[in-house]
Image (cartoon, grey):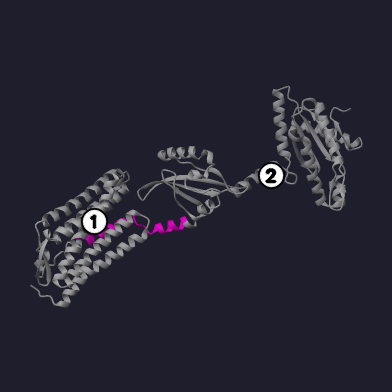
Amino acid sequence: MVELTDTVFVLIVVCCYFLPTVILTALATDVYMRNKSSATNRIFSALLLLFAYQYICQTLAYLLPPEAGILVYRWGTVPVSIATLFFSLLFYVKVTKVERNMPRWLLYAFGYVPFLSIFVLSTCTDTIISGWYIDEPWLRIAKGGLYPAYNVYMLLVTATGNILLYFGMKRSNEEREKQKFRKMLLLANISMVIGFLTAAEAGLISHFDLPAMPELGLIASLFWAWSFRMEMVKHNFFPYQLQIYEMLHRRSTFGIIIADRNGKIVEVNPAAKQVLDLLQTKVRLVTDLYPEPVREEKLEQYKIDFARRELKKDREMELAVSEGRTLLAAWDNGFLDFDDQQLQIYIARDITEQRANENKVAFLAYHDPLTGLANRAQMYDRIAQAIDRATEDHRFLFAVLLIDLDDFKRVNDSYGHYAGDRLLAHVAETIRNAVGSLGISARLGGDEFVVLLTGVASEGTARKIAERLVSDFENRPLQLPTQTIRISSSIGMSCFPRDGRDVDTLLQAADAAMYKAKGGGKNRMYTAANP
């Protein structure tokens, strides 16, 4: 048998027991930092630390005097090994998601049973370890009567873990998930075999004429921890990408709101929080975003949609963010399973400015930008609609007024284009006030305006409105800071169907009547039927 010097002995202990402690602690830190909020990460990290604690206990047991070493073994290694088995079982439960079908009290048992076991062992440790003896240079334990039961206990917990992994593999629908559990099951069984081989009292190492090292079964835990960590990184259980996702979550200009099945908001990113802080009400539930009278109804609908996992795209919601100011948000939703919870995620974006621009573009497509009246395209469309209606309903009457300002060029030449634009806007306002709900008015271009009167009972009513327009223009001059500009207009009127049965004919008839009015002295109205 080869004799070991004290220095070589210490080196062996440091390499075989203390170095794994450092490795396992580093692995535990790495797993925890990858995703601090994940329960699976926290449990696996705690499990690695328990393995590390067992290794440090072994290091102290061999480097301290025998009397102190056996105390470390009794009150450190044995209780923590039991806690480690239960935490490994809890880890399997989390990974395989078996907890969803478990009573809550049974799930919590994985937390308090280890501590109960440690308490019981603190009163009956001698039944597992009855004493110790020195097998130079190693400290050996003398097994008590319960030591076989202790080993059976560890075997049962290990087998339960394998069963959980097997059921996790069978329950998986995706091949990638099945492959993950299949690999984990293989690694767990390899670890168990390594444990049995290296824990043999006169292990294989004795065949090489070296002193047999006790408790080499811990090598199995080191292999299990390292291989599982590598496998879970491979399958993105503990990915560094989560840090990237977290950064995107924080920096996204889109608002992200995550809610549970009861509508309670569990997470918001800074962009969403910035909007929620502006709201006039405190938002605790997703449905608090709706007006108060409909919140209860919306909450019931939320729960129904959540159960159905109903997806909604490009929904819009108007939020009152301050006095007299609203924000328009467009949102999509989705569902995810995270940290053993079913959650709904909303991704919202502020489309207030976008919608305002869209409305502006749509408005300009059918309106005159200077006066806000309808433009030529919209007026042609409205007259065509009126023709269709009048063709079907012979009781429906309408008239077309074509308005031209007299001597408008003189206004531009004398006072400038700014004054001319002010005059056109003033005329448009006068037309709006006179016509009201009886029709629609438009600017065709330059100083030409058209009015479509659809709410009149007779041609006489339309004529009175046209005459009132001439009078209103004359009596409402444009007041500028340095001068007053008086307004004179010539108006021509045509009626359907007498003066035309299509848009162009009606406008031509009204235009001809307008020129008759100019020829008749201006500042008056003529109808197409005037001789």
Question: Which is more foreground, mark 2 or mark 1?
Answer: 1
x then y, percent, for residue 274: 53, 54
x then y, percent, for residue 77: 19, 63
Looking at the rendered image, the quarter that the N terminus falls into is bottom left
Q: Is residue 136 above or below residue 358?
A: below
Q: Which residues are magenta?
A: 220-249
Q: Is residue 444 above or below residue 229?
A: above
**Label 2: how many Cα within 10 Å (few below 14, some 14–19, many 20+):** some
In the rendered image, which quarter is residue 445 located in?
top right
Sequence-earlier tag: 2 or 1: 1
Task: Tell me the element at label 2.
Answer: helix
**Label 1: how many Cα within 10 Å (few below 14, some 14–19, many 20+):** some
Looking at the rendered image, the quarter that the C terminus falls into is top right
x then y, percent, for residue 125: 14, 60
Question: Is any atom of residue 194 visible in this view?
Answer: no
Which SS does the magenta portion mostly show?
A: helix
Q: How many marks?
A: 2
Which label number is shown at residue 364? 2
